[in-house]
Amino acid sequence: MMRLDRRDFLKCTAAGAAGLAAFHSVFLGRVFGAAESRSAAAPGQKVKRWALVVDLQKCIEGKAKGCINACHQWHNVPEWPEERLEVKWIWEEKFSRLFPDQSFAHMPEALRDRPVLALCNHCANPPCVRVCPTKATFKRPDGIVAMDMHRCIGCRFCIAACPYGARSFNWKNPREAENLRHHINLEYPTRARGVVEKCNFCAERLADGLQPVCVERAEDGALIFGDLNDPASKAAQVLAAGFAIRRKPSLETDPQVYYLISTVR
Amino acid sequence: MRLYNGMIIVPGLLLFLAVVTFPFWIGKVRAGEIKTFESRPAPAGIACVLPKKQMREQHMALLKQWRDQVVREGDRAPVKLVNGQTMELSLTNGCMKCHAKEDCGPYRAHATYCVDCHDYVGIRVDCWTCHIDPMPNMMEKK
């Protein structure tokens, strides 16, 4: 039998590895490439980047409640009397707590304590997606950070990772909540006990060409929703003509919910 | 060759064989007692996505494929039925639009159309913990 010396063995190994690498890039590369292109936008259609602009001049206390209720009713969000069980998609929070970096001792008290609408920021660089061990939460090509409830194992890493408190855990079966026992929206599923949930930018309504529930419910254009990749969209125009802030931008999550302070003339 | 203690060994072996082959012959013995599954009538005059036989065999794979298509790829393009009509890709607002109709039989429990058969074959599906079963009383509550 032929004896391989060390030098020939190494040569053969190198040739084999090169061959495998070539096979992988040519054959498998094509397979995975095909899978990826399936989820991208159709040819001729530009990729969207959905974003929401909250006009702080118009979205004032009292009015936001309507948006919150409309959203929670549409998405069958359970209401629990105990705060520790709370599930929320969109909610109100003091300005100083949403924008700790923009708050200081001498600012108007009315502004500091003013309730401001908050929801999932659908970050361009979402930490929740990075930590999810099952890829139950993922970023869609149009920028929506979506949840696949079928895959959520309830580990709550995403809750810990989200710097905006936008995620809630279902400690109890949501269908046992008082509000869902009386009224359920057949257009949208409920969730099960043991999964995390959050705002989905109304992905199911966008697919039908509708606006998100909160935007539809908002009065005199307090909430503006649109595609920031389209310069003609209302949201892009409002941002281009005004001064807006975002929550905790220093964390570099690149939030896509903008808070419009004023319009530059 | 002599078999010692044959009086114990032979009946013991027979008993052992009877016990081991129990699953094979019990079905034959009790054939008359076991009910065969009677499927609910299909909703009258409505076509499904695939012919009946294929739906029976492949609906689980189809549902999973649609689930991934809608949830992960955001592709909600309606699916074509056998008769050329289209259906929304949704369990509650697609499939159940037909399969929860009265002519599928009387309601006994959640999503009777699915549960009947799954109960018979001993499969537990957890679709209905989240997806809404459009039971008549649920409809009224809306």
Image: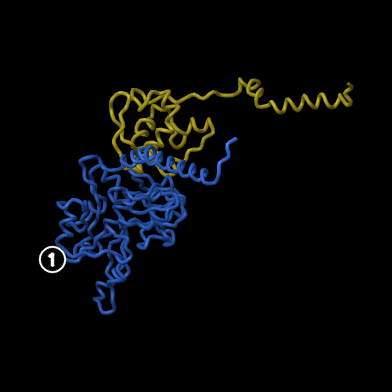
| Residue A22 visible at all | yes
Task: Tell me the kind of residue under disc 1.
Answer: Val
Tell me: A210 left or right of B101: left
Q: Position of residue A71 (x, y in %)?
A: 30, 52
Position of residue A197 relative to residue A247, above or below, is: above
Residue at position x 24%, y 65% from top? A245
Tell me: A100 left or right of A153: left
User: Splitting the image into 4 quarters, where does residue A250 fall?
Assistant: bottom left
What shade has chain A been given? blue
State the scheme by which the image is colored.
Answer: by chain
Tell me: B4 left or right of B35: right
Q: Position of residue B81 (x, y in %)?
A: 32, 27
Label 1 sits on a secondary structure element that is loop
Residue at position x 32%, y 24% from top? B82
Q: Position of residue A84 (x, y in %)?
A: 44, 61
User: Splitting the image into 4 quarters, where does residue A239 fall?
Assistant: bottom left
| Residue B139 visible at all | no
Residue at position x 86%, y 24% from top? B6
Count residues near mark 1 (Cα–Cα under 10 Å), then give few for <14, some for 14-19, many for 20+.
Answer: few
Quarter of the C terminus of chain A within the rendering: bottom left
Chain coloured yellow in the rendered structure: B
- Residue position for label 1: A264
Q: Chain of mark 1?
A: A
